[in-house]
Amino acid sequence: MTGTEIAELFERLGRLVAATKQKAGDGSVWDYTFADGETHRYVIRGLKSHAEAEDSAFNLIIWIWNAKDHLKRRAESSGQDTQMVEDAVNADPVLPICADLANHLKHGQLKRSRSGLYPRLGSVSFEASQGAVGSLHLPRIRGGGDDR
């Protein structure tokens, strides 16, 4: 790998970081049925959907971890010991967790945990202050999904 390719890799990582901070989107709709059988529909407009927010986070995690392999190739092509990259990763408190998350995303399971923590990603959720909410309408869904 060349220095230019490494620079491009870090530019990509910068774009992915920016994408995780981007909040605007088409929104999200979901229904929730309470224990008493009553179902409410939740609609959020103007924000990324849950799936888009999740995709942004997943892409960033995987590319951060992929960067390690690119850096090892760069070290190798410039005659340096690739173990220095592994040592730097292992010395960082966050990168082994990123490795576990990326490998779980890539393989659907984690047989061996680099961090020893076997971390898992939770579900995407949104939180908003009262001042950030323009309006709140919680229609009750009955029968065929009609808003009433």
Image (cartoon, helix red, strand yellow):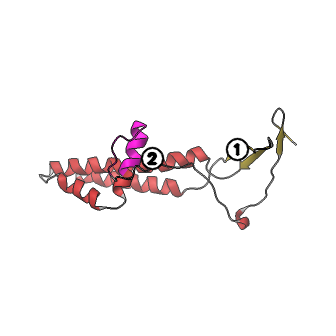
Looking at this view, name the residue that lies furthest to the top.
Answer: 144
Residue 37 image position (x, y, % from top left):
79, 40
Write down the region rendered in magenta.
99-114
Question: Circle 1 sits in a helix, a strand or a loop, which is it?
Answer: strand
Report helix, strand or loop for mark 2: helix
The spot of residue 98 in percent (x, y) is 38, 52
Outermost residue, left side: 79
Residue 34, given in percent of the width and then of the height, sits at 75, 45
Image quadrant containing the C terminus: top right
In this view, the residue in front, 24 or 111, is 111
Q: Earlier in the sequence, mark 2 or mark 1?
A: 1
How many labels, in total? 2
Which residue shows up at 23% across the image and 55% down it? 85
57 in the magenta segment: no
Q: Which residue is mark 2?
A: 59
Q: Residue sitting at 40 percent across and 49 percent down?
A: 118
Q: What's the residue type where badge 1 is placed?
A: Val
Pointer 1 residue:
29
